[in-house]
Amino acid sequence: MKPRYQNRIELLQGTLDLLILQTLRWGPRHGYGISQAIRANSGEILQVDTGSLYPALHRLERQKWIRAEWKLSENNQRVKLYQLTPSGKKQLASERSRWEQLQEAIGGILNPSAKESET
Amino acid sequence: MKFLFWRNRRQRQDELDEEIQRHLEMAARDRMDRGEDASVAKAAAHREFGNAALVREVTHDQWGWAWLENLFQDLHFGLRILRKSPGFTIVAVLTLALGIGANTAIFSFVYGVLLAPLPYRDASQLVVLNETTPRVGNVSTSYPNFLDWRVQSRSFAQIAYIEQMSFNLAGAGVSQPENINGDSVSPNFLSMMGIRPFLGRDFEPSEEKAGSPRVLLLSYPLWQSHFGADPNVVGRTITLNGNDFVIIGVLPPDYRSLDNNSVMLPIGVWATNNPSAASREDRGDSTVIGRLRPGVALVQARAEIEGIAAGLAQQYPAANDQFGIRLRPIRDAFVGNLQTEILVLFTAVMFVLLIACANVANLLLVRGAARTKEMALRAAFGASRLRIMRQMLTESFVLAVLGGALGLALALAGTRVLTRLIPQGTLVGASIGLNGSVLLFTAGVVVLATLVFGMAPAAHWTKRDVQAELKEGGRTASIGSAHNRLRGILTITEISLALVLLVGAGLMLKSLYRLINVNPGFQPERVLTMDMYLSSERYSKDPAVLNFWQQVLDGVRALPGVESAALGTNLPLTGNHSRTDITIEGMALPKPGSFPHPDVHTISPDYIRTMGMTLERGRTFTDADDEHAPLVALVNDKLARQFWPNADPIGKRFMWGPFDPASKNPVKWVTVVGVVDDTKLYGLANPSRLEVYDPFRQDIYHDMDLVLKSRLDSSALTSEIRSVVASIDKDEPIFAIATMNKLVSNDVSAPRLALVLLGVFSALAVVLAAIGIYGVVSYSVAQRTHEIGVRMTLGAQPRDILRMILGQGGKMAAIGIGVGIGAAFALTGLMSTLLFSVGASDPATFAAVAILLVLVAIFACYIPARRAMRVDPMVALRYE
C-alpha cells in the first residue's frame, strides 16, 4: 500500500501549522531542523511526515507567515532557512488561542464532572 | 511574462530538490554522528524521508498553478508518446476524425435548419396559418377569410397576408427576359417581422387598398445583380409584366423568405382589378403570418382560431364548409419535412462516433497492455494514481483534439458536398456552414469523446496492483480476464451499433428501390419542359393568348429533331397544381365542401402522347376541340372508376363547380371523351388523385408549360426554342427549364440522399466493427500462442484451433447481433415516415443485415485464426 500523505495533511493541517510557527519562534531553521525540533520537543512522540512538512512550509511561505532565505551552513552548504514574519507572529498568537480554546472544549467534554462541580 | 513564469518555476523546482537533498544529507550525517555506518545511514535517511517524488509533487501543489503545469507536462509527454508509436496514432486519429467529422457535418445541418435563430424579431411569437380541408389537406387562405380572421381574432398582436406571385422582368436594360418571384404583402408585414428596409422606406398602411400606386422593394440580390448596387436606386423604375413599378427601397441582405423572392410589393397592388382578392373560394398561393400577443400560447390561439373557422364555415358554407385553420410555429414552416431526416442522420452519426470511440478504447487497451510496466514503474516512483490517470486522459485528449482538427477538415469538405447534393429550395435559405455554434459543438464532442474512449482504459490500467505487475515483468500480467471482458464488451457494442445503422440503410435502400420502380403514369425519358407566363396587357384578350400558344406550338413543332410538342398546365412533380369542384351529372348533391375536387390540367392535343401517358379508352383531343366546339374532357382512371364504376365513362357528363339549384344560368355540361392512366402528380410516394384534362382552347390559361419529346441535347434545344419564342414576342421569357427525368430524380432526391448518407455511415460502422473484432481476436491469439502450442503438442488439430478462434469471434458477433436487432426494432420506428412501402421492422432487411454481419465477423476472425493454425508448437513453447 502506498502511504496516503494527502489525507494526513488535511488531518494535521491546523496543528502542524501551529507547531511549525511555534518552532520558528526561537529563530530561523531549515526543514530538517524543524522536524527534529518538533520530534525532540514532543519527547520523541510526534514524528512529522516529510510529505506533510514540506507542503506545509511552502504553503505558510505563500501565505507570508514565514519567509525563506538561502544561507550557508557550518559546512559551507546552501541551506534554506525559514523564519517567522510579523504577520506570522500574529497568526501564531491567534492559532495558539484557538488551540487553547479547543483544548479547553475537548477537556470539558472528556471531564464533564469537573465542569458540573463548578456550577 | 510567461517566460518569466516558467523560469521562476524551474528555479523553484531546483530549489525544492536542493532542499530535499540537504534534508537527506543532514539526516544521514546525524545518524553517522550517532555511529551508524555511512551507507546504512544514507539508506535509513532515505527510508525515513519516504517517497521523495511524492513529497516533491505534493509540495509542488502548494505553489498554485500546479494543475496548469501538470497539464503542460502531460500534454508534452502525451505528444512524445504518440510520436513514438505513429501507427497507433494514425489509426486512432483517423478513426476519431471520421466520427467527429461526420458529427460536425451533420450537426451543421441540425444547427442551420433546426436551431439557428431565425432573422426575425422574437421569432418564437410568430406563427404561420393556413386553411385545411379533409379533401386535400393543407391549402392556402383566401383573402376575404384572412380579413375576417384579422377582425375577429384577439390572439394576434399583428397578422399579415403574403401572396406569392411571379413576374416577367423585361424592358429597358434587361438583355434577356426572365421570370422572377415576388410577394405581395400586407403593409404591416415587415414591421411585424422586425425587418427594416436596407434602403428606402417600408410600406404605408394606405398601400393595402386596391388601386394603390405600383411600388416595390427589391431583394438585396436583385439590387446587386440588376441595379449594380446603385445607392440611389430609390425612385428608379423596373418593368414587370409590362408595367413600370417605382422602387421605394431594398430589402436587407439577410432577409430570409419562405419562397425565394426577388421583389416585394404592397398587397394593394395585387388586389387592383383582381377578382381573386374578393373571392372567398379562391385560395390562390398565399401564406398568413401572425404575431401572437405577449402571453398568448399557441394552443390558446389555436382554440380561438378554430372557433373563428367554424363560424366562417357556417356563415359562408359554399366557400368554407369543412374548412379549418392550421397554426404552427414559423420554424416548422421553414423546417418542413426535413426534421425526421436530419434527426435520423444525426442519430446515425452519433452511432458512428460511439463505434469510433469503442475502437479507439480498444486500441488504447491493447497499447495499455504494452505499457503496463511503464505505468507500474511510474507508480513505484511515486506518481499518484490520480496523476497517472490524468496522464492517460491527457493522452486521450491529445488524440481527440488531433482527430477533431482533422474531423473539422473532413466536415468542411463534407458539408460542401452535401449542400450540393440537396435539391435547391429544400432548405429555404438556411445557412449551412461551420459557424461558431458548430465549432462549439465539435469542441464538446472532442471532450465527450475523450471521456468515452479514454475513461475506461485509464480507470482500467490504474486500478492495477503495482507490485504484481513489476514482479511479473509486465508481460503476462496484462492477460487479465477483466481486460479481455472489457474489450469484448466494447466490440459487442460496436457490432450492435453497426447493425442498427445497417438496418437503417437497408430499409432506406429497399424503400428507394420500391420508390423508383413506382409507375409515375407517364414516360419521363427524353421529355423537356419549360414554363411560359403571358402576363402583359398584350394578352388581356383570349384570342391573343390562343394565338400566341398556337404560334409557339407551330414554331416548336417545325424545329428539326422535335418528335412531338404540346402545352399543358400543372405538370407532374413540379409542385404546381390547380383543383376545382365538379358536379357529375345525375349525382346526389353532396354538402358544399364535399363535391368531387379533381386536379385539372389544361392541355393541347399532343400532350398525352408527348408525356407518354396511356389512353385507356376513347380518344384524346384533336385540333377540332376548339373554342367553338362542344366542351370535352379526359378523366383519369381513378375518377372513372369512382363515379362510373359499372358504366362506360365515355359520353358521361359533368359541370365545372358545385351545382347551384338556385342559379338561373343554363348548366354547361362537359362530355368525357377519353380515359387516361393515373399520374403521380404529387410525387412518386404519394397516391394519385382524381384528375381531369380539358383542351387549352376551351379553358384559356396564361401560364402554361411547353413539353417536347426529342432526341436533341436539351440545352441546344432550349436556345432554339428561345429564339422561336423571341420571334413571336421578344419580351416573353421561358423559365423553369427541366427535363422530366430531372423532375423525377428531384422527387426521389431526399430519400436518395438519406440512403447515400446512411449507406456511407453504416459502411464506416461495419468496417470499424470488423477492425474491432479483428483486433480483439488477433490480440487474444497472440496472448494464447503458448496455450495453442500446448494444445497442438497434446494433439489438437489445426481444425480444432480454427474452431476455437472462430468460436470466440462468433460468440461476440452473436451477442452483438442479438443486442443490435433489439435496438434496431426499438429505433427504426423513428424513421417510418421516411420509408415508402417498407415496414420499419421489415424481417427480410433485418435477416439480410444479420447475415451480412455474421459474414463480416467470420472474415474478421479468419485472418487471426489462420495465424493460430500455423502456430509452430516448438516455437510457441520456447516463447515463454
Image (cartoon, coloured by chain):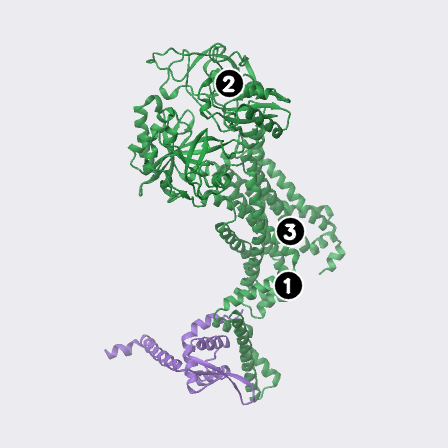
Residue that numbered label 1 is attached to: B474
Residues marked 3 and 2 touching at CB (< 8 Å): no
Residue B415 on image: x %, y %:
55, 44
Q: Residue under label 3, please give it.
A: B775
Q: Position of residue B304 (x, y in %)?
A: 31, 34
Residues at marks 1 and 3 touching, judged by CB atoms closer than 8 Å: no
Question: Disc 2 is attached to a residue of which chain?
Answer: B
User: Hey, what amino acid is under mark 2?
Assistant: Asn
Q: Is residue B426 visible?
A: yes
Characterize the local packing of mark 3: few (<14), some (14-19) or many (20 or more) Cα atoms within 10 angstroms.
many
Q: CA distance from mark 1 to mark 2?
A: 94 Å
1 vs 2, front mark: 2
Question: Which chain is rendered green in the image?
Answer: B
Of badges 1 and 3, nearer the viewer stands: 3
Chain letter for the purple colouring in the rendering: A
- Decide: is B320 above or below B436: above
Q: Is residue B258 left or right of residue B616?
A: left
Query: Image point 63% across, 53% down: which residue?
Result: B91
View extreme (bottom): residue: A74
Badge 1: few (under 14), some or many (20 or more) residues near its Cα, within 10 Å? Answer: many
Image quarter hosting the N terminus of chain A:
bottom right
First in sequence: mark 3 vs mark 2: 2
